[in-house]
Image (cartoon, helix red, strand yellow):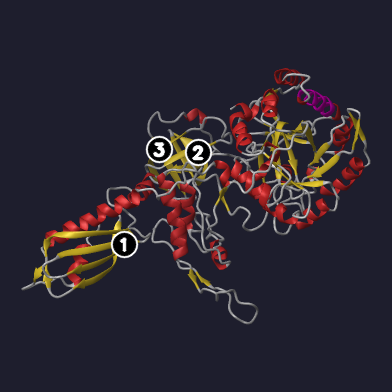
């Protein structure tokens, strides 16, 4: 989708770069030798909502590329020191397609990829689905390359630029092969609008140029211009080849089976078949074995007859002949036994695994422990994202404050502000507690960030991932929403295995699911966020670096995230807040706040005691007002619908009920 970038209230001029959050498609073909060399044993290909042709195309490219890598396997376990050679790789010429030869690499301006792969592989990947292909972060962070931001949908293979238009024909200087039947689209620099495109009817070569003709009336020629870029979006010939690789009645992939054959004269022939996952079937002939006068059942004959599995999901891997003596059975009977083996194996493979259910077990038997509910008064927790909001929260008498700052070095100052406070609430003196949050993602080289967090000497830490569970294991810890606690078993695992004080329920749960969670495990395990700007995107891609600097990463971007207050405006005019963390990861917060105010009293009735409200970029005054009204709600002085209606009137953008009601 397209967005506008707003920095300090002013729209940033980005030209045709409007798709701020649309990365190029990951293609790891260039780094495949390095991945194999590193010891990676499994490669994953993703194709969400893609066609069967996409799956066949991309899988074929990587399968063939792996097969063409000649690898010397290093010693196992890994060697230490010495002069032993590291794994070496040899790349073999990879194309028999006359359209893609070494001589026309230069002509098509498509150099060999780094791994030694040719134009055919690149062409196939781009035709499968391409918003541009890129190695992502494999070769280091480059925010300028990851998101070109010029389009957000499939483009395919770039053919060239329109040089002239005459008599409903287009002339281009082609940089890639093109033929009649291919589908193309004309790119005039406005991908968000309807674009002209269609099938090519004719291709004429005129020196270095190619003249393309189309079906009469298929294009609106008034919307096509000299200078437009032409992309090939469809190759029917390639699609046909790909469909042939998986379509049809005959299976394209067969699984191995082993067959043992046993028999004695005057008895039935017995065949036992096993597949590769342990299914075993046994079949017997209906005709008794007799002594053979000629053509006895040799191993060769048995292999031939039981191996005729061409149109089945199986192939014969090994046959063991345990027949005693030279015996005979009609070939028709062997064929019947083979067919029975296939039917029985297919039936077994189609059945789900068998389970034995303990009818006396209850859900709570699955939990590690069943800690008792401890009656307590409701607690309103406030999360703030800067020091001004922190000071505003302290003025309201809030007892528990979370801090999530971009710069963890500021946590020391925040802790000092809170620990010097003494609050008088309902006649009692309280000392507010401050819990600070490390970034949601931590990489192996980023423990220095966690060290800055723990150096603040806060009262506790908000745990966002598994790395935090280990680093803060000796501290007071509270699990955040990113642990994705959506059921009692997950809650039990984190709460008791890692001794977390409590857990934040997943943001994906609606009110019915929250109620189920509180009924199936102790409510004092949880806190629920009832007011927030939902974090919509959390990404390694840094919008600040890519669009407010010429740098590639934090080392040369000039840190615009520390200089500008940035929002991105969507197509309906909502401005979403953009923030960076200490690791340069960006979070986009929904510009419209969400509230679960209407359901607070239901949750209180179920025993929930801890409720959280979160702020992003609200002013100190807004922070004070919002905390005050939610405190009234918790104390039963106002109703949830009153608060929702009031916030809706106060907020310029409005407040939605969010996922709680869905």
Q: Nearer the viewer, residue 540 or 399?
A: 399
Q: Which residue is mark 3?
A: 199
- Mark nearest the camera among 3 and 1 is 1
In the picture, residue 272 is in which quadrant? bottom left
Q: Which residue is mark 1?
A: 274
Q: Earlier in the sequence, mark 3 or mark 1?
A: 3
Marks 3 and 1, how far apart in space? Answer: 51 Å
Q: Earlier in the sequence, mark 2 or mark 1?
A: 2
Mark 3 Cα shell of 10 Å, populated few (<14), some (14-19), many (≥20): many
Q: Earlier in the sequence, mark 2 or mark 3?
A: 2
Mark 2 Cα shell of 10 Å, populated few (<14), some (14-19), many (≥20): some
Name which residue lies at 64% across and 28% down. 658
User: Where residue 123 appears, x then y in whole percent?
Assistant: 47, 52
Q: Which residues are magenta?
A: 622-633
Helix, strand or loop at mark 1 = strand
In this rendering, is residue 539 above or below 516?
Answer: below
The answer to whether any part of residue 408 appears in the image is yes
Q: Which residue is mark 2?
A: 164
């Amino acid at each position: 989708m397209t967005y506008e970038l707003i920095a300090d209230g002013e729209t940033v001029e980005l030209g045709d770069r409007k798709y701020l959050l649309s990365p190029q498609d990951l293609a790891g073909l260039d780094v495949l030798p390095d991945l194999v060399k590193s010891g990676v044993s499994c490669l994953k290909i993703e194709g969400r909502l893609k066609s069967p042709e996409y799956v066949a195309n991309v899988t074929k490219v990587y399968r063939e590329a792996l097969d063409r890598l000649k690898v010397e396997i290093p010693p196992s376990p890994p060697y230490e020191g010495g002069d032993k050679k590291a794994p070496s790789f040899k790349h073999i010429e990879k194309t028999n397609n006359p359209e893609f030869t070494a001589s026309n690499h230069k002509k098509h301006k498509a150099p060999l990829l780094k791994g030694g792969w040719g134009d055919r592989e690149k062409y196939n990947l781009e035709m499968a689905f391409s918003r541009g292909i890129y190695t992502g972060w494999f070769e280091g962070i480059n925010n300028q390359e990851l998101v070109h931001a010029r389009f957000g949908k499939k483009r395919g293979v770039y053919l060239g630029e329109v040089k002239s238009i005459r008599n409903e024909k287009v002339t281009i200087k082609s940089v890639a092969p093109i033929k009649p039947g291919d589908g193309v689209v004309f790119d005039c620099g406005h991908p968000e609008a309807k674009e002209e495109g269609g099938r090519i009817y004719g291709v004429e070569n005129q020196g270095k140029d190619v003249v393309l003709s189309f079906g009469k009336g298929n294009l609106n020629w008034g919307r096509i211009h000299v200078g437009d870029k032409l992309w090939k979006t469809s190759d029917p010939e390639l699609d046909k080849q790909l469909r042939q690789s998986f379509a049809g009645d005959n299976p394209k992939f067969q699984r191995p089976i082993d067959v043992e054959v046993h028999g004695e004269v005057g008895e039935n022939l017995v065949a036992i078949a096993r597949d590769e996952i342990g299914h075993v079937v046994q079949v017997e002939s209906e005709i008794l074995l007799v002594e053979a006068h000629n053509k006895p059942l040799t191993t060769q004959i048995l292999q031939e007859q039981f191996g005729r599995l061409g149109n089945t999901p199986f192939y014969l891997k090994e046959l063991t002949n345990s027949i005693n003596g030279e015996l005979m059975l009609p070939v028709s009977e062997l064929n019947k036994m083979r067919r029975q083996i296939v039917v029985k194996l297919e039936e077994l493979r189609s059945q789900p695994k068998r389970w034995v259910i303990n009818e006396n077990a209850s859900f709570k038997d699955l939990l590690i422990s069943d800690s008792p509910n401890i009656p307590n008064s409701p607690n309103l927790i406030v999360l703030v994202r800067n020091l001004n909001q922190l000071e505003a929260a302290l003025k309201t008498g809030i007892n528990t404050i979370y801090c999530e700052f971009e710069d963890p070095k500021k946590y020391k100052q925040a802790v000092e502000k809170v620990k010097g406070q003494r609050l008088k609430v309902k006649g009692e003196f309280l000392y507010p507690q401050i819990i600070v949050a490390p970034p949601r993602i931590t990489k192996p080289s980023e423990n220095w960030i966690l060290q800055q967090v723990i150096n603040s000497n806060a009262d506790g830490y908000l745990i966002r991932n598994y790395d935090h569970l280990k680093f803060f294991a000796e501290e007071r810890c509270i699990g955040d929403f990113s642990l994705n606690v959506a059921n009692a078993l997950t809650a039990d695992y984190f709460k008791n295995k890692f001794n977390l004080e409590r857990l934040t329920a997943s943001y994906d749960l609606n009110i019915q699911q929250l109620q189920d969670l509180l009924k199936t495990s102790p409510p004092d395990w949880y806190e629920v966020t009832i007011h927030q700007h939902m974090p919509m995107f959390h990404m390694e891609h840094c919008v600040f670096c890519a669009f407010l600097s010429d740098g590639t990463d934090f080392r040369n971007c000039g840190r615009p995230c520390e200089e500008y207050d940035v929002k991105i405006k969507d197509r309906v005019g909502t401005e979403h807040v953009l923030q960076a963390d200490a690791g340069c990861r960006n979070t986009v917060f929904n510009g419209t706040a969400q509230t679960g105010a209407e359901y607070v009293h239901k949750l209180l009735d179920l025993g929930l005691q801890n409720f959280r409200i979160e702020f992003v970029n609200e002013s100190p005054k807004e922070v004070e007002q919002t905390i005050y009204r939610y405190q009234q709600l918790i104390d039963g002085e106002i109703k949830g619908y009153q608060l929702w209606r009031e916030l809706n009137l106060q907020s310029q953008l409005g407040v939605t009920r969010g996922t709680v009601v869905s």
